[in-house]
Structure formats: structure tokens, C-alpha cells
Image (tube, rainbow, N blue to C red):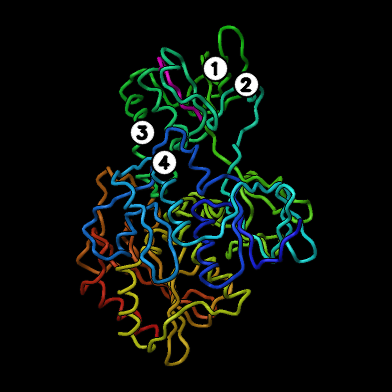
Amino acid sequence: MAEEVLDYLVVGAGPAGLQLGQHLGHAGHRYLVLEAGSAPGHFFETFPRHRTLISINKKHTGYADPELRMRMDWNSILADGDDAPVLFTDYSEKLFPDAPDFLRYVADYAKKHKVDVRYNTRVTRIRRDGETFVLTAGDTEFRANRLIMATGVTKPYIPQFPGVELIDQYVDVDVDPAHFTDQRVLVLGKGNSAFETADNLIETAAVVHVGGPRPVKLAWRTHFVGHLRAYNAGILDMYQLKLQHAILDGDVREVRKDADGYHVKFAFARADEVIKEIRYDRVIGCTGFRFDASLFDEDCRPELTINDRFPAQTSSWESVNVPGLYFAGTITQVRDFKKATSAFIHGFRYGVRALAKVLNERHHDVPWPHTELPAKPDALTDAVITRINRTSALYQQFGFLADVVVVDGDTARYLEEVPVDRVLEDPPSDAYVVTLDYGPDHDKVDPFDFVARAAQDKANDHGEGHYLHPIVRHYRRGELVATHHVTENLENEWDKEVHVEPLTAFFTREL
């Protein structure tokens, strides 16, 4: 049975799919969200396996401004319209909340905003019929002019080595620590799922080794929240204090299993021995996830990238080889891989909002929303200072989303939250690109070493600061002609004379 041709089909009713559905409905487009599960947020029914989110939920911020509060609220998703938003901070006061609370939240979001979702509808095939996407789910076909995949990365990413099929995987391993009492356990992976798994076992297991080819990267140093978070770092403390558990740098060459347990040939990267065989009672793979492209027919299968883990995407989140196929949610991390926050709700919610604007602009002749102001130094300074002191989008999507001031004679247009790469691919003739970002080599500075910060009471417009701060870049006909760094501030408040006057002088020179 075939249904009408819609403007949009969205696959996946997680936070990204729900938010995009709300944006599409508010804009008056004909859309439908297809969800394999019986309720929204199906992924969070299982993950994280140990049921504690590491996305920050700081309810008490001292801010009255709801926009500023979103800087500390990493779980709420956005909505267009005048209705009061549904905020996750009303569902839990825990800094690291429980996954079931998030399931309650997304269910209420879908209900309040009347997002049109077809549940228990598992898509098994995606094909093209001319310019139309055709999705098969059971006996039903759904058709749309454009398709947005918001399914996330749902399949385990499993490195290949002899014996990998013998080990447990994060997606279904036993999570009861009592079942690992006095055992020797190897956890493969160096991300949060690996350390979440290891920390769950450090009380009961005799020995826990966490192994992988690259050194552990710490979020508090790199500013990338997908690197190891302090919440999951208990085993690092025990390792450094010589309490049996350890971190191994290197590659697994082979795993074999016999009556004595697992025998792992491990090639060390930073030790004298080249390859050592180590015995374990359990081996658990926690090596991440990948996008499932098997649903697509060959003629519309998206090109993959980064070890075939993600679909390759343009700066507008469209497939590089399948026109009309877009992506939303954590799957969009390919655009800022391990740099900004598109892999996480507090990042991709702004990407979803920008995608809705892209779709309106491209397919419905709706210009990117903007305000007009005089092309005068004081007016531009006031607009930029006002925004950088409020915006949560540029704060969360540092260096990835930008406000853009397009100057045309005596008038300027102020556009909010545009992907930086999209601006630079088709640059206006005269534009200022405003971002919040860290200084050069910021991820090489250990915040707990004594490293001098840039002075906060004097202008540092050449970018001496390592900490997050506003950067204004002036482009003429696509060429970068000038850059101004607004002095960093410990409280992220850029409204003092040391911030305003140098920025005004910059606009005066450039205009």
C-alpha cells in the first residue's frame, strides 16, 4: 500500500528526529517521522548500558535568561513557536541524570508539540523512484521528495582481527559487576563507553585492563566532550596509584579461547616487548558505533567516510552523492569530527535548527532569517556584543556555527547560527563571521599545569588567549582580510570597555 508523496520523511524519533519534525510542522510542511520502536528515544532504552547520562544537566545556574541557561542544559531540545519550551531540567535535578528520565522527557516533547510520528515502523528498504524517495516498512511504502536520516549510529563498529567474533560487545554484554568477581577483564576501546564499562567493574574484578591503539584523550584538556570525561575516569586513578588495573596502548593481533579463558596477543606501542600474550577471563569490545547504510539500494546509497562509519556530508548536511538525502543528529558529527559538539544533543540541536533553515531556503524560497541594521561601527559592535553575551548556539557549537554580518552599502544584514563552512563555500562580497572558539593549540595545554592565561583587563586582539572567546573575521570576496579576538573572560561575559572599545575600533577600520 502506497501513501501520498510528502515533502519530507524523517527516519528516527530520537531527539534530533523529534526536533526536526517540530520545525517542519511549524513551517507548514508535509512530513512524517518513522520510528522502529514503540516510543520516542528508542536508543536510550538501552544506552548508555549503565543507565547514567554524562550530558550535563545543571538546573541551578544563577541565570534568569533562558538562553543562557541552555549553556548548562545539555539535554533539552529546541522548538519553534511561542509555546513554553519543554525543558529536561524539569525532569531531573541530577547533574548526570538517569536515562529513564530522558525517555520521559522526549515522550512529553513529542506529545506537547504534536510531532507526527509513526511508531512500530521499521524501515527495511530505501530506494529512489525518479526524484522521489520510497521507504518500505512492512507492507507499507512511504514516499517523499526529500529524506532526512536521524537514526544515529546504531551498529557496533568492530575492528577486524582474528578471534574478534569470540569476544563480548558493549551493546549486549552483561552489566552486573557481581558476575565478574575476581576475574581478569580486558576492555577494548579508549572512549567513554570503554571507561564506563571498566569503571563498573573496578570494585569486583581482580584486574581490569583498558586497551587501544591510541593514548587516552581527556575531555578536560581537549575541550571535546566525546573524549574521556572525569565522570568515567576512576580507573585512571587506580592505574596511576598501582592498584592492579591498567591502561594498555597498542593493538590486539589475535584472540583465541580455550578452557583456560581468552588468550590475547597484544602488540604494545610504548613498552619494550613487541607482542605479549595475556590471559583474561573476559574480553569486551567497546570500540564505538557506525551508521547502517544497508537499508539503501545501490543507486541511492550514501557515500561513507571515516573508516565507513559515517555518511559523507556537505556543509548543509546533505549527502555528497545523493541529492535530497540529508542527515540530522549525532550522525552529523562527521562535519566536526572530534572537534566540536555535533555528536551530542547540546550541539546537534542547533545543527537541526540550522538544517530546518537550510531546507526552507533551498526548497521553499524562504530566506535565512535576519535582522537589518546600519552598517556603522557602533551598530555592528552593539549587535555582536549583545549576541555573544547571550547565544548558547555559538557557545556550544564553538568554531562550527557562526553569526554572519553581511554589509551592503549603508545597510548590514545580521544572520544567526550559520555553518561556518557553508558561509565560506559561497561567501558574500563583504561579510564578518562571528564565532566563539578556543585559541590555537588549546588542546595541547594541560589546564592543571601552571599556564599563564591572557590578561582579562587588556585587549588581546591577536589571539593570545587559549580559553573560549569571541573571534570576528572579516572576509572580502571570500578572502580573509582581518581578524579580531575579543579578550577572554573567566565568566564568559564580554561587555566591558576592554571588549567593546577594541571591537568598535576594528569595525571602524574595516568599514
Under circle 4, the secondary element is helix
User: Which circle's residue, 3 or 1, is located before the other in the chain?
Assistant: 3
C-alpha separation, residue under disc 1 versus residue under disc 2? 19 Å
- Report whether 61 appears left or right of 277: left
Q: Nearer the viewer, mark 1 or mark 2?
A: 2
Circle 3 Cα neighbour tier, 10 Å, few/some/many (<14 / 14–19 / ≥20): some
- Most frequent secondary structure within the magenta stretch: strand
Res 463 label? none
Which of disc 4 and disc 1 is earlier in sequence?
A: 4
Q: Sequence-wise, which precedes: disc 3 or disc 4?
A: 4
Instruction: Name the amino acid, label 1.
Output: Lys
Which residue matches tag 4? 100
Q: Earlier in the sequence, mark 1 or mark 2?
A: 2
User: Outermost residue, bottom direction?
Assistant: 410
Amino acid under label 4? Pro
Q: Alpha carbon of mark 3 to alpha carbon of mark 4: how far? A: 23 Å
Instruction: Give the mark nearest the N terminus, 2 or 4.
Output: 4
- Taking the spot 80% from the left edge, 65% from the top edge, the residue there is 130
Pinpoint residue 424: horizontal percent, then vertical percent.
54, 71
Q: Name the image quarter holding residue 241.
A: top left
Q: Residue at x 53, y 61 (%)?
A: 20
Please identify the quadrant where the C terminus is shown.
bottom left
The verdict on residue 471 being magenta is no
Mark 2 lies on a secondary structure that is helix
Residue position marked by numbered label 1 in the rendering: 276
* Amino acid at pointer 2: Leu
To which residue does mark 2 refer? 166
Find the magenta span and give its range.
205-212
Locate residue 82: give its quadrant.
Answer: bottom left
Rendered image: mark on residue 233: 3
**Considering only vertical position in the picture, is 461 above or below 326?**
below
